[in-house]
Amino acid sequence: MAASSSLFSCSMHMEVLGPKISKHPKDFVCCHSKMSYMEPRYLKPTCYPNSRFLNINKSSNWEKIWQRDGFHCRVLKNEHAPPFSEGQKFQLSDIIEAQQFDRNILNAIFQVAQDMENIERNSPGSQILKGYLMATLFYEPSTRTRLSFESAMRRLGGEVLTTENAREFSSAAKGETLEDTIRTVEGYSDIIVIRHFESGAARRAAAIADIPIINAGDGPGQHPTQALLDIYTIEREIGKLDGIKVGLVGDLANGRTVRSLAYLLAKYKDVKIYFVAPDVVKMKDDIKDYLTSMGVEWEESSDLVEVASECDVVYQTRIQKERFGERIDLYEKARGKYIVNQDILKVMQEDAVVMHPLPRLDEITVDVDTNKRAAYFRQAKYGLYIRMALLKLLLVGW
């Protein structure tokens, strides 16, 4: 457990009125009368009075800043130190939309995701979720999302109940309501992951369920776990989230992934978002208005080459034929207008990346796959770690 997760907030150079019993890492021992530190990003000054047993050894993540009036002020080198105590209940009961998350929780989730990476690589046979059962209710087709959730659950020792095409092969085909299905399935499981063709379905499920609900995509609405893994991918690949430029390309009207991603990008500073889409699938006004209200700079463009040359991330999406209904003429008009190929790679920055929520059709040519800037398959792998983290947090806490 990181030291910051057991500390409590007070004013700098101010006595703390009440004692607090805390658990600390083994290398965290006291030697000075008073100590305080500032948590990066959280901006929470924290003081330890009368800490005669506190010592920071050479291998510590703490860096000394200054010493004054008996205070030894230090800052964590790890800017993502989780602000929550080990064993503490997760702050969210369900994962429904990207707006639920603030930067503190995002940073802490990403820290847990890195722990999950270590478990997946070094500790096969983990039993963190032994005895827990996850149900997946997928009313729309899915490969990556469903399998990554199932893999995440099994890699942590849990079990899975699954319905691959609930719209056709569950009691929904007989006319059963979503609410009745949820009330039934929650009796068999500890957590439900749902994908549905109607926007708002996950919220309806969460409203009547007594167990956690995870939205794995609700029609053209949102896909919050995809957005979480997208942000995590950007941080891992680019090394930062503040001050980046992101080009969202393709079907922005129907793409729930880009909508959720836009909400999360708005949490960060000095971000600029470019929208590059055919006229029939441009980003909807509600997202633009939200970004404007959050002070996020955005720009619509029809020139993918120019945008790609400016961006740290080119986030390509497919034109979603299934959202066009009988208007196949509009689909054909939109498809193929913006393609990431070798010409786009030539103008991109050397350390930029190409991302895609997958599946792809022809909007990224296959010869891009071998380029180091092609991050979409690594992105899918990062999704496993994010979903392992979310299942762990929702079921057993921090």
Image (spheres, grey):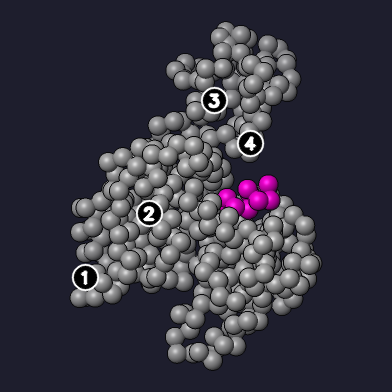
Residue located at (58% from left, 11% from top): 30
Q: Amino acid at mark 2?
A: Glu
Cβ–Cβ under 8 Å for marks 4 and 1: no
The residue that mark 2 highlights is: 150
Contact, CB < 8 Å: mark 1 with mark 2? Answer: no
Looking at the figure, which quarter contains the C terminus?
Answer: top left
Upstream in sequence: badge 1 or badge 3: 3
- Residues at marks 4 and 3 touching, judged by CB atoms closer than 8 Å: no
Mark 1 vs mark 2: in front: 2
> Who comes first in sequence, dot 1 or dot 2?
2
Alpha carbon separation for disc pair 4 and 2? 31 Å
Label 1 belongs to which residue? 171
Determine the CA span between mark 1 and mark 3: 50 Å
Does dot 4 land on a helix, a strand or a loop?
loop
At a point 56% along the width and 13% down the height, the residue shown is 29
Marks 2 and 3: CB-CB under 8 Å?
no
User: Considering the numbered disc 3 on the image, is that residue within a helix, a strand or a loop?
Assistant: helix
The residue tagged with tag 1: helix, strand or loop?
Answer: helix
Return the residue found at the far bottom: 329
Q: Nearer the viewer, mark 4 or mark 1?
A: 1
The residue indicated by pointer 4 is 79
Please tell me which residue lies in front, 10 or 67.
67
Q: For mark 3, what is the residue?
A: 3
CA gap, disc 4 to disc 1?
Answer: 48 Å
Residue 119, how many percent across, how many down? 47, 38
Expressed as whole percent of the image width and height from the top left, the position of residue 365 reads 64, 73
Give the spatial CA distance, label 1 vs label 2: 22 Å
Q: Is residue 189 left or right of residue 10?
A: left
**Residue at the image position 59 percent from the left and 60 percent from the top:** 376
Between discs 2 and 3, the one toward the N terminus: 3
